[in-house]
Image (cartoon, rainbow, N blue to C red):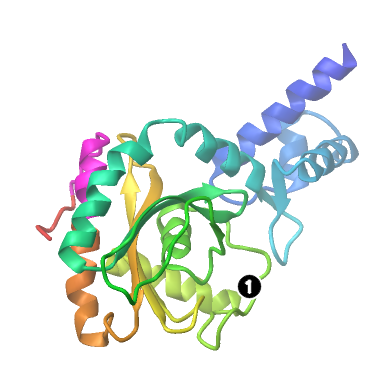
Amino acid sequence: MSEIQSLARGLQIIDMVWQAGNSVGITELAEKLGVDKSSASRLVKTLVAAGYLQQERGSRRFVVGTRLYQMGWELVNRMPLREKARKYLYRLVNDTEECAHTAVYSEGKALMIDDVEAAHSLRVVGGIGRLLPMHCTAVGKTLLAFGELPPPQRLERKMPNTITDPAALTEHLARVCELGYAYDDEEHQPGVRCLAAPVYNRTGMAVAAIGISGPTVRVTDHRVAVLAGHVIRAARDLSAELGYEDEDNDGL
């Protein structure tokens, strides 16, 4: 009976932290559960070890862990997202003449679930199944900014342009939200620029990122705005097909 009670309390803690929408401390959890702080602390440590909670950086409070996000995204990805997105990838290739791709969140990375290559001999070669870092790729930054996912604990430098400071990344992601798309300016690979925008399901959850990649000789500064428009439109049209109603559509 005690094991069942511990399980129930563990599930209650997960639910309380999720519903809070921000970090929660041991004292608050203990009060809500009606247990002493040491018992609450043991339960929380167990959940942290399993990945269901994680300690907030720089504090003794706790937030939802990556395991819950991973499970949620994996459940979402069992839907026929890849098949529905494919025609929009072809449209992006036709409109931009660059390679197009769809990515989702998986195990703390951006997982490429589909790629359509452009006809140019000089192009960015993709590959379905690639796991890409979140902080220095357009699809990863899109998932972080619009999917409300926890940022990586370690911001590894891949290129000179890679953002490695947590505060700078937070500021950058806020700008991504303002623009409606993410931009990778040789942050992950030399000579490659990428753009991506969020795809929403009918509940308003950002379930994927759709975007393009191309060499810097073609994805030039003066083309970025035009290319971003194509990417945003493709993302919005795919979101609409998934049942999302965009009340803030500005006509792009």
As drawn, 185 above or below 99: below
Task: Tell me if residue 241 is in the magenta stretch.
Answer: yes
The residue drawn where x is 57% and y is 43% is: 69
Q: Residue furthest top?
A: 1
As drawn, 170 above or below 86: below
As drawn, 8 above or below 163: above
> Looking at the rendering, which quadrant does residue 209 occupy?
bottom left
The residue drawn where x is 62% and y is 80% is: 157
Q: Is disc 1 surrounded by few (<14), some (14 to 19) or many (20+) residues within 10 Å?
A: some
Quadrant, the N terminus:
top right
The residue drawn where x is 23% and y is 53% is: 90
Q: Which residues are magenta?
A: 234-247
Q: Residue furthest left?
A: 251
Is residue 102 left or right of 41 when viewed as pictured? Answer: left
> Looking at the rendering, which quadrant does residue 228 occupy?
bottom left
- Which of the pair 222/217 is nearer the observer? 217
Task: Tell me if residue 81 is in the magenta stretch.
Answer: no
> What residue does disc 1 label?
155
Q: Residue 163: image x %, image y %?
A: 54, 79
Instruction: Judge whether residue 182 can be spotted in this image.
Output: no
Tag 1 secondary structure: loop
Is residue 94 left or right of 210 when viewed as pictured? Answer: left
> Looking at the rendering, which quadrant does residue 116 occupy?
bottom left
The residue drawn where x is 33% and y is 60% is: 117
- Tell me the amino acid under the disc marked 1: Leu
- Which of the pair 76/194 is nearer the observer? 194
- Which of the pair 12/118 is nearer the observer? 118
Q: Residue 75: image x %, image y %?
A: 51, 32
Quadrant, the C terminus:
bottom left
